[in-house]
Image: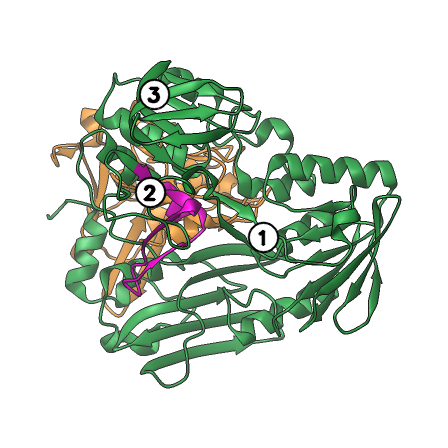
Chain colours: A orange, B green
Amino acid sequence: MRKPKRIIIREEYCMGCRLCEVYCITQHSKSKDIIKAYRGEEPRPVSGIYFEEKGSVSFALQCRHCDDAPCLEACITGAMYRDEGTGMVLHDREKCVGCWMCIMACPYGVIKPDFGERKVASKCDLCIEAEFPACVEHCPNEAIILVDEEGERIYKEAV
Amino acid sequence: MTRSRYLIIGNSAAGVAAVEAIRQADGKGAITVVSDEDVVNYSRPLISYYLGGRVSEDRMAFRDRRFYERNEVALILGRKAEELDVERRRVVLSDGTELGYEKLLIATGGRPIIPPMDGLRKVREGAFTFTRLSDAKEMLKYIRENEVKEAVVLGAGLIGLKATEGLVERGIKVTIVELADRILANTLDREASAILERALGNWGCKVIKEDTISRVISSRGRVREVVLRSGRSLSAPLLVIAVGVRPNLELVEDTPINYDRGITVDEHMRTNVEDVYAAGDVAQARDFLTGWSSVIAIWPVAFRQGKVAGWNMAGRETRYEGLFPMNSVELAGIPTISFGTTNPPEADGYEILARKDEESCLYRKIVLKENKVVGAIFLGRIERAGIFSGLIKDGIDVSSFKEELLSDDFGLLVLPAEYRKHMVKGEGMEV
């Protein structure tokens, strides 16, 4: 199995601006436009990020695309699956029935219930439709970075 | 006689997980999977969604037909494994076919318990158990043909309540009869049960507790009425018997394979007989929390055990570390997730943290022992509940952030910095 690219969190660099969430939502919107995504689209997409903040510490956390992912074992529909090509853990919203077994199983707590059009689970897909994760691209202080299977950093410019 | 490197009896979570694991470790060895059902693949927990009309039959599969082709699995459907000869390493199917094996996985699951009830023998139509797709299909057919408007469900465990949900979605008025003094008695505590009971009531269901069915009255073989132990009688044009499942041990009963409540297996999912493994609802393995050997008949446990069995069968030595009970169930629109020991005996050194808002149907409970989480209930709000599965598994001391455990925005941030950093940097990654 191929190992996926991964997002590394460097909490000491996080400024708490939450731009990662803004751009995640924008990337996963229909229009891909920041204003339209926030002002016009109903339902607004759920971000793949849990942003946590307390005092001076903050970080943005998204799906870790685990090697041995508990969500894959807990999923009763097969909606949660390993993409063989990229090694990523992806989620098929069409198949999902919103049973929340994945939410129960994920020790990072990074799968969200999405009560938008239909009740389904929702999580980070590493912006598979784009070439580079929007949260990483737009983090102004490199608090979230992308690395390859060897742990080597991948820069947007190189993609 | 065909002989496979790997023979798997059972095609649900454990069987499928074993196929995946075997193929990760062995791309070539022939795999045969036997199922007594005539369906390529379907997810058992989805039968209540099917009953309720939320999932159509063509969307019941958790792995498609191509899964078996891609993994070069010889799939034998609609035939039951009836005889096992561990000396000669062969299994005989219901049609007489003999299958040889080098490694065998028994993943035959559970079968419904049917408690004794007077008159049940005379019933030929209208009484159902609810564990298979065929049960759901036949029930639905019966409902349509007989224009069933009301039903009695015996048993308020997960299966009974999910059946109830499906029936309610079909516009049927359900009365639930439960022997315990509350619903989901094995999964939840008194407070959580009470909230869900009220929600079921608001949904139009009637729950009769501390009672059971003593007699079933039928006319011309068709169920009509049930009489409870209390003497009360209920009209029952449809009866669902859902008091629980027990491991399906038929195949091993006359073999040297050891079983207790389920087939006893070691940490490699091996039975006492060489090259014979067991996994899923039929197996009795280590319970992570108690350390005892027990049957935990839930999907994630079956899947994990199947995977561990598959790896070991294919020579990739892996230990099953044990799991603990965990459930996610939504009833009457209220989601609930629970882990481990939710209802500990008084004293015994357990500490309980709980917060309840009955008006909004919110309840959260954390059970601690020696400052470690051993159980939890999340009712109404289930976001981030999974973090607690990690806290239980990793045995994290929560004394430094105990007061945060009940908070709505509980997250990784309150965890000890070292543990948190290890987590957020991801598996096998230390930056």
- Asked whether, in this view, residue B141 is left or right of residue A152, the answer is right
Mark 2 is on which residue type?
Answer: Ile
Count residues near mark 1 (Cα–Cα under 10 Å), then give few for <14, some for 14-19, many for 20+. Answer: some
Q: Position of residue A114 (x, y in %)?
A: 51, 47
The residue that appears at 48% across and 32% down in the rendered structure is B62
Viewer-proximal residue among A10 and A98? A98
Viewer-proximal residue among B337 and A146? B337
Instruction: State which quadrant residue A39 falls in.
Output: top right
Q: Disc 1 or disc 3, which is closer to the eye?
A: 3
Instruction: State which quadrant residue B193 falls in.
Output: bottom right
Mark 3 is on which residue type?
Answer: Gly
Q: Which residue is mark 1?
A: B113
Real-space CA distance between mark 2 and mark 3, rounded to the nearest whole angstrom = 17 Å
Label 1 residue SS = loop
Chain label for disc 2: B
Count residues near mark 3 (Cα–Cα under 10 Å), then give few for <14, some for 14-19, many for 20+. Answer: many
Q: Which residues are magenta?
A: B277-305
Residue B291 within the segment the image draws in magenta: yes
Chain label for disc 3: B
Label 3 residue SS = strand
The residue that appears at 60% across and 26% down in the rendered structure is B58
- Which is nearer the N-term, disc 2 or disc 3? 3
Count residues near mark 2 (Cα–Cα under 10 Å), then give few for <14, some for 14-19, many for 20+. Answer: some
Q: Which residue is mark 2?
A: B257
Q: Position of residue B381 (x, y in %)?
A: 50, 62
**Is mark 1 in CB contact (under 8 Å) with mark 2?**
no
Answer yes or no: are tags 1 and 3 on the same subunit: yes
Viewer-proximal residue among B121 and B6? B121
